[in-house]
Amino acid sequence: MSVISCVTIRSHILQRLTTTSGHGIEDTALSLLALRNSGADPHALLGTQHRSGAWSALPNIGPLSAFHTALALLAIRPFQTTAVRRAAERAFEWLSELRGIESHWLWQWKFRLFDRQVRFDPLKSGWPWVPDTVSWVAPTALSVAAFREWHRESTRTAPAIAMLLDRACPKGGWNAGNSVVFGVDLDPHPDFTAMALLALRNGSPGHEVLLRRSLDYLGTRLEGSPSPYSLAWAVMALSAHGHQGVDHLKNRLEHSATAKVDQLPHRVLALVALALEDVPYTFEEPSR
């Protein structure tokens, strides 16, 4: 498709996001980002923040979630108002206190001496999806990105980055949490791989081969994918690292989204709009 058609599909998506509502925090946060230059207002998202400072997957329903809290922080980042900064302060306080249970000495002892079915270093921990569970790739990756984009110094980010590198699949890429279970190498997953690569966008000395393998995996794994959600995450990750495969996947994303645009949920529409910007959005913007 041409550049003109790319603009057309983005305009159609932005119009839908403006005139219809999503159903959860992921929909709201990603739509806010997609519409950040079109008069979007963070008030609705700020209104769903829990008194603890966190967000849950659905407003005021279910357990508090590191993934959704980090995503909300990334979404409100472009809007530097007093209310936004206050909300961010509370959210970062909550994230700073939340740890994967493997960081506790008792669980470290358990994983090192007894529970050997999984392969990971419990000394390297990040963020769980919800409290009282182990660290996972998606919430850790977005939390690292949130601390970085808000220029927040934290003792949590270095071990979280180490955790992501430790959990990488042997041939590159990332699964949801572990890379080896019961002695079997797990296959990487495109979405989690893209999120991890976005978190590691500033490079990791000594791990260049891993990053290159992971980027190449995304470029080849999604070559024939019909999934706008996976393609959008991949386009943003490849763009963040300046990978040569980004233009091909961006064209693939445009075709895929155009074919099913009226059936896609808000979070997917918003991700597509972000990935189809002239320069794909990568959760990084200049400070204001």
Image (cartoon, grey):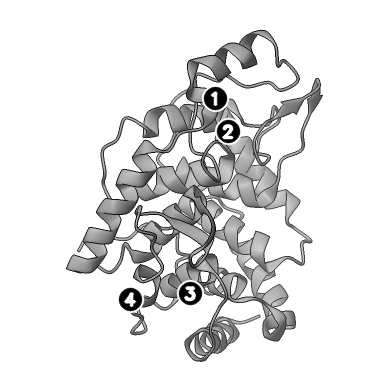
Q: Is mark 4 on a helix, strand or loop?
A: helix
Dot placed on the residue nearer the N-terminal end, 2 or 3: 3
Three-letter code, disc 1: Glu
The residue tagged 4 is 43
Is residue 197 in sight in this rendering?
Answer: no
Mark 3 belongs to which amino acid? Ser
Which residue is the site of mark 1?
102
Q: How far apart are marks 2 and 1 (CA)?
A: 6 Å
Q: Sort mark 4 into few (<14), some (14-19) or many (20+) by Cα contacts within 10 Å.
A: few
Q: Nearer the viewer, mark 2 or mark 3?
A: 2
Q: 184 or 139, which lies in front? A: 139
Q: Earlier in the sequence, mark 1 or mark 3?
A: 3
Position above or below: 121 against 15:
above
Q: Which amino acid does label 4 sit on?
A: His
Q: What element carries label 1?
A: helix
N-terminal of the pair, mark 2 or mark 1, is 1
Q: Tell me the element at label 2.
A: loop
- How far across and down, in percent of the image, does residue 146 sit? 38, 50
The residue singled out by tag 2 in the image is 134
As measured in the structure, the alpha-carbon distance from the residue carrying label 1 to the one carrying label 3 is 34 Å
For the point 38% across and 34% down, the residue is 157
- Residue 182 or 187: which is nearer the viewer? 182
Q: Which residue lies under the disc numbered 3?
A: 31
The x and y percentages for residue 235 are 57, 59
At horizontal 49% and vertical 38% (from top left) the residue drawn is 127
Q: Earlier in the sequence, mark 4 or mark 3?
A: 3
Q: Do the residues labelled 2 and 3 touch (CB within 8 Å)?
A: no
Which residue does the image show at 44% across and 58% down from the upper left?
55
Contact check, label 4 and label 3, Cβ < 8 Å: no
Amino acid type, residue under disc 2 in the picture: Val
